[in-house]
Image (spheres, grey):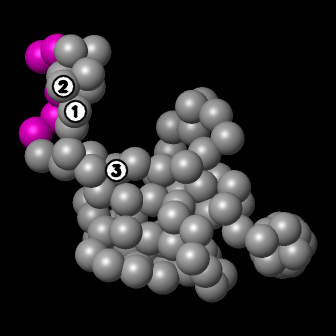
Amino acid sequence: MATWDDVTRIVEGLPETNEASPRDWRVRKKLIAWERPLRKTDYAALGADAPDGDILGARVADEGVTELEELLTEAWLAQAPKTLAKAFLQNDN
């Protein structure tokens, strides 16, 4: 299971990203991922499968991302300025 240290390590590897406050990660000023408590609707939807403690929220284009690194990179790409995202993708190839 991934830890908050894993999230921090992955996010710190993305350009111009910082931890604005504990467990609140941003690219420049745009929020990409954050810690949040489960809501009543989460408990209702998950039932007995609901995890203990807080969970990771992330801004992504769709819900089909299953790997943590992919999830955080997609959240970063969704919020990063287009020129920064383009440069990152070109350097990744």
Sequence order check, earlier mark of 1 and 3: 1
Report the Cα–Cα distance between label 1 and label 3: 12 Å
Q: Are marks 1 and 2 in contact (CB under 8 Å)?
A: yes
Q: Are marks 1 and 3 in contact (CB under 8 Å)?
A: no
Residue 65 placement, left or right of 85:
left
Q: Is residue 68 visible?
A: yes
Instruction: Give me the residue at 57% from left, 31% from top.
Output: 63
Q: Which mark is residue 56?
A: 3
**Which residue was labeled with disc 1?**
39
Quarter location, residue 76: bottom right
The boundaries of the magenta stretch are 46-52
Instruction: Give me the residue at 31% from left, 69% from top.
Output: 23
**Which residue was labeled with disc 2?**
40
Residue 34 placement, left or right of 30:
left
Tell me residue 89's x, y (percent): 83, 68
Report the Cα–Cα distance between label 2 and label 3: 16 Å
User: Looking at this view, is 24 or 47 the one in front?
Assistant: 24
Residue 27 placement, left or right of 88:
left
Sequence order check, earlier mark of 2 and 3: 2
User: Disc 2 or disc 3, which is closer to the eye?
Assistant: 2
Q: Is residue 59 above or below residue 77?
A: above
